[in-house]
Image (tube, rainbow, N blue to C red):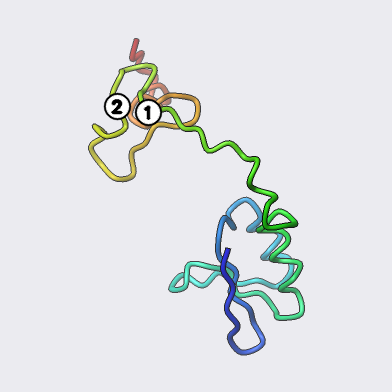
Amino acid sequence: MTTATQNKSVLITGNTYPVKDQLRAMGGLWNPEAKGWMVPADRADEARRLVGGGSPAAGANRSTYRPSKCQVCGVHASGLRAPYERIGRDGVCSGCRSDRRQGFDAD
């Protein structure tokens, strides 16, 4: 998470997506160029706690495990065709997930 001050607003970046509604409720505005939220300076500490989970080490226990091979089709993560394709934490690649949503059986 990074912060920068601009005109009585503070830029909050990091993993803001899970708390975007709370940031918006406290007066935050999304800044697409900076890829972060501009929140009022008087609410910056609260916003940092939201994004940081309360303390710098709060996210340290979160699992960063991500399978390297799709459990359905067997494609390796390095063999995915496009940068937006990936293997989710559930072990299914985005292609197989899409096929399942459309009703195709990949098995």
Mark 1 secondary-structure assignment: loop
Asked whether 42 or 58 is in front, the reply is 58
How many numbered badges does the structure rendering display? 2
State the quadrant of the C terminus.
top left
- Whichever of labels 2 and 1 marks the residue nearer the N terminus, that label is 1
Residue kind at label 2, given as amino acid type: His
Question: Going 33% across and 38% down the picture, which residue do you hit?
Answer: 85
Q: Looking at the picture, how far across and down is residue 45, in whole percent?
A: 74, 71
Q: Is residue 49 left or right of residue 33?
A: right
Q: Residue furthest bottom?
A: 7
Question: Going 69% across and 65% down the picture, which residue do you hit?
Answer: 48
Question: Going 75% across and 56% down the picture, which residue do you hit?
Answer: 54
Q: Looking at the picture, how far across and down is residue 14, in whole percent?
A: 55, 60
| CB atoms of marks 2 and 1 within 8 Å | yes
Q: Is residue 32 left or right of residue 20?
A: left
Q: Residue furthest top?
A: 107
Q: From what the image shows, is residue 19 above or below residue 46?
A: above
Mark 2 secondary-structure assignment: loop
The CA span between labels 2 and 1 is: 6 Å
Q: Looking at the picture, how far across and down is residue 80, in whole percent?
A: 26, 34
Asked whether 40 or 98 is in front, the reply is 40
Which residue is disc 1 drawn over? 68
State the quadrant of the N terminus.
bottom right
Q: Quadrant of residue 40?
A: bottom right
Asked whether 80 or 27 is in front, the reply is 80
Mark drawn on residue 76: 2
Estimate how packed mark 1 is, as few (under 14), some (14 to 19) or many (20 or more) residues with alpha carbons within 10 Å: some
Residue kind at label 1, given as amino acid type: Ser
